[in-house]
Amino acid sequence: MSFAYILPLLSCILVYGYTWLTELGGCAPMEIEQILIMAILGLFLSMITAIGEEIGWRGFLLTELRATLSYKKINFAIGIIWYLYHMPLIIFSNYNNGNKFSSALCFFVMVMAMTTIANTLCMEANSMWPSIVLHSSHNLFVQSIFDKMTINASYT
């Protein structure tokens, strides 16, 4: 379960760290106390939305597809459905970086990778909780910490 929490943090450190170091985007550091509070309490708030999605993706869809599809096809099917589920947000709201095409492309890569990891964690644990923690942790670190610390530039 700790892997499910830490993996999104590590991926954010790599992606956002690269963005800041190469000056593709700037960094406005947050206070460490604020980060720690968000990293602990924010996880539980983030679970509110993640639980609903994970009941659908892993609780229902993964369970049903395991009876008929191979591991790779399950990951592909759930990843595509998850991606399409979020596309209206990317296209019609501010759930993008201002460039809808690049946001959709980056989201596709992320969701396909995250689907494989979440499915694997669920199947190994025989529980939805690892995927709930992974999804919540990802949303927390991306939306509430690293995005807020990033100053947009032309390529952010």
Image: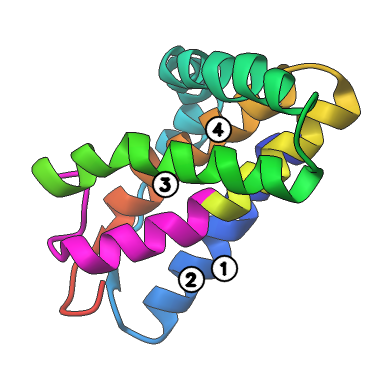
Number of residues whose C-alpha sits closer than 10 Å to that of mark 4, classed few (under 14), some (14–19) or many (20 or more): many
Image coordinates of residue 110 in percent, x first then y, are 50, 55
124 horizontally vs 113: left or right: right
Q: Quadrant of residue 69?
A: top right
The residue tagged 4 is: 135
Number of residues whose C-alpha sits closer than 10 Å to that of mark 1, classed few (under 14), some (14–19) or many (20 or more): few
Q: Give the range drawn in magenta.
A: 94-111
The residue tagged 1 is: 14
145 horizontally vs 118: left or right: left
Residue type for callout 4: His
Image quadrant in which the N terminus is located: top right
Residue type for callout 3: Val
In space, the residues marked 1 and 2 are separated at their CA atoms by 5 Å
Which element is circle 3 on?
helix
The residue tagged 3 is: 142
Image coordinates of residue 141 in percent, x first then y, are 47, 43
Query: Cβ–Cβ below 8 Å for labels 4 and 2?
Result: no
Residue at 30% x, 58% y: name it: 104
Query: Cβ–Cβ below 8 Å for labels 2 and 3?
Result: no
Reply yes or no: does residue 104 show up in magenta. yes
Q: Which mark is drawn over residue 17?
A: 2
Indicate the colouring scheme.
Answer: rainbow
Query: Cβ–Cβ below 8 Å for labels 1 and 4?
Result: no
Pick whichever of labels 1 and 3 is earlier in the sequence: 1
In space, the residues marked 2 and 3 are separated at their CA atoms by 12 Å
Residue type for callout 2: Gly
Which of discs 4 and 2 lies nearer the camera? The answer is: 4
Number of residues whose C-alpha sits closer than 10 Å to that of mark 3, classed few (under 14), some (14–19) or many (20 or more): some
In space, the residues marked 4 and 2 are separated at their CA atoms by 21 Å
